[in-house]
Each structure stands twice: as C-alpha cells, then as structure tokens.
Image (tube, grey):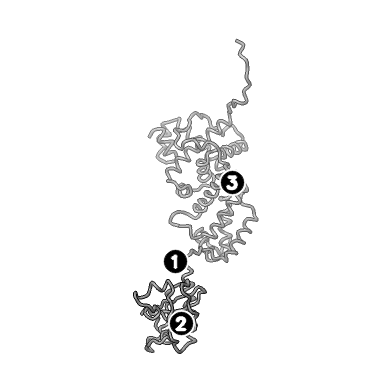
Amino acid sequence: MNSTHPETDDDLLMAMRSGDEQAFVTLYRKRQAALYRFAQHMSGSTSVAEDVTQEVFLALIRDGCGYDPERGTLSGYLFGIARKLVLRHLERGRSDVALETEGEESGWPQLAVIDDPMADLTWREGIDALRRAVHALPRRYREVVVLCDLEEVDYADAALVLNCPIGTVRSRLHRARALLLEKLNQERSPRPAMGTLRPVRCLS
Amino acid sequence: MNCQEFREFAFDAPETVAHLQDCPSCAAWRQRQDSLIASLRAMAAESQHVGAPANLEAKLVAAFRTHGGTVAPVRAPRMWAPVATWFAAAAAVVAVAFVLSNQHVPQPVPHRNPPAIVESAMIEGDDSPFNSADFIPLPNAQQLAPNEDVNLVRVEVPRSTMIVLGYDVSAERASEPVEAEVVLGPDGLARAVRFLE
C-alpha cells in the first residue's frame, strides 16, 4: 500500500470521493477479496462472485454518500450491498438450497454427536467436507457462518449486514454450527438412502 | 446456568467456565464447537488468496475515471415548480429585455380580445383587459389571435424597463427589481406584460 495514503477505510473513502484514484485502488485492494469470497460462498459461483464484487464497487463509485459511518463500518456497508446483490442473483436463479423450510428456532440442536466429526478425517478431507457442509446450509445460516466464522466480521457488523439484532446473529450462528456438526457427522457415517436399498422377498 | 442456556446464549462467554467444569456433556460439546471453529478458520485461511480476477480492478478504475473522480452523487434538488416553467420564465425575461431595449417610444395600445389565461386576471366587467388589467402589449410583438393558447409567467425585471412603457420611475429606483407577469404566445415569445406594483 502506498504510504502516502491514509490507512482507514473512512479516510480512503473521503480521499476517493475527492477524486483520488489511488485511494480508490487501495480501498478496492483492501476489501475486494473478502467480498468476492463472501459472494462465492453464498452463490457457489465464481462468475456471480465477480459480478457482485464489481457491482459493489460501482455502487460505491456512484453512491458513495449512502454510507453512514455512525451506523457501522465501511466494510459492513460493503458486505451489506454484496449480500443484497447475492440474494438478487439467488432469487433470479432459484439456486438456493432446500432446508429453508426449517424454522429458524426449530428447537434444540441435535446433541447425539458424541465424537468430533473432524477428528478421524485427514486435514484435506476435513476441509473439503466442511466446505460442502457450509454450501449445503440454508441461506440464512450459511451467510452468518461465512460472515462471522470465515470472514471474521464482528457480530455488530454482521447484524448491520443482515439487518437483524445481534442476538439473532448469535442464535443463527449457534444453530448454523450445530447444523454443520450434524452434516459432518452424517458424512462420516452416512445412512443408506432409500433409493440405494434393493428390494428382497421375504421367504419366511 | 443450565445446559440449554449455556449452549444457546453463553457458549463463548467467560462466565461459563464453572458450568464446563461441572458438566462433562457441555465440555465435550464445547470441544466440538472449538474444533469446528478451528476448522472453519483453517478453511478460511486456505482461501485467503482467493479474490476477484485481476482485470476487474482495471475495469473499476476505468469506471472511476469516467466519473471524473468526483464520486459524490449529485442529487436532483426538489423543485417546487416544473423545470419548463423556469425555462419559460428565463425566456420571457430575455424576450422582454430584448424587446424593451429596442424601443424607446411606447406604442399605442391596441384593443384586442384577451387570451383565456389572461382573462382570469382581468377586472370583472371591463371590456378592454389589456388596459384595465394592466397588461401592456409589447411593442412590435405579434398580436394574439382570439382563443390562442398562451402561457402566463411571473418574472422579475429591472424597474427601468417600466420607463420605456411609459411609467415614471425615479432614477434612484431604476435598478430595483420589479415583479411582472408576461404573456407568452404559443411560440414562446413575450406578447404582453403587466407589472405587479
């Protein structure tokens, strides 16, 4: 980063709004990767992620004044735009996963998992299994895991991005982690699906 | 604190240490949570290098330059009157100033039928609206045909413009503004004027 430019996002935004191209480039380089990854995790598509990242920064170029520092950080504001764009893509493509019908507060998470599902997997297997499990989460749980656990957005910013109270962020994260453990446990010891069972005749 | 409270609301709060010591089930649950979070962080670390393609930066910089670097949005001010009215008013001022600046002798005021929009401003019962309602046809302006569509706009002109139409204006007040209503013909040119003072 160019040392002649201020470091904070707000300073960069101010410099950018006064026409400083280098400030815009610095801000872009600082924030684009997290936004791209968020969009990719949420959509499962690199092209959507690229489109979303581009649209976020175009929105910042066009509507720089929409950001209010008193309501949250610039990073949270950008994630909020990215989320809306991703949801628009998902609604357009109907590419969200099934489990949405589950109630958000659908009870106490299953506690039958005794062992650590990650324990007897290799590191690579574990990461791949976890990635699949994250992608299979219902959207409202996936986004909170991606924000808080993968991109390490704090709860206050996540609440701003998701437009919900902090308590809801915590409860969704709690539920999301429980679902992840369930999915990982199922993957480790999968039960045969009905379609894979062969019919047999009872001879007794 | 029971197990449900611990797991739902306080699993990452420091005051839960005592509960963990007393509850092996929650301690195991907490261990799984920690393992999961560590795995998620490992997954995040593995994809730290992932980002938007390099050509996107060039595209966005080009977009930034297109905006001239001044990226603060320009919001349209709320106007109480339509833009066309302002445009017509500006045109009227120019037209009145142009016509009056080329005339030094007031012309006789012809009697004609008033345009509909002017009619409403007339004094009731008066048959010569341009005289009675103080609408003065502008010198050399095209005459209005009966029932011709016209527009009436209110403008501010220098008081000195009243002199050429026969009004007495003191030299000290010549530069003061005065409100006037101007009748615009369908071609947008000023036809008549009346001063509101």
**Residue type of the residue flagged with mark 2:** Leu
2 vs 1, front mark: 2
> What's the distance in space between the residues labelled 2 and 3, CA to CA?
71 Å
| Mark identifier at residue B79 | 1
Observer-nearest residue: B128 or A38? B128
Which residue is located at x 45 percent, y 57 percent? A69
Which residue is located at x 52 percent, y 39 percent? A138
Task: Give above or below for B110 relative to B115.
Answer: below
Q: Is residue B195 visible?
A: no
Observer-nearest residue: A176 or B73? B73
Residue ID for mark 2:
B138
Mark 3 crowd level (few <14, some 14–19, many ≥20, 10 Å Cα): many
Q: Are marks 2 and 1 in contact (CB under 8 Å)?
A: no
* Residue B15 figure quarter: top left
Q: Is residue B153 visible?
A: yes
Left or right of B169 on screen, residue B49: right
Q: Secondary structure at mark 2?
A: loop
> What's the distance in space between the residues labelled 2 and 1, CA to CA?
30 Å
* Residue A19 figure quarter: bottom right
Q: Secondary structure at mark 3?
A: helix
| Mark identifier at residue A40 | 3
Residue A37 image offset from top left, x and y in percent? 58, 48
Q: Are marks 1 and 3 in contact (CB under 8 Å)?
A: no
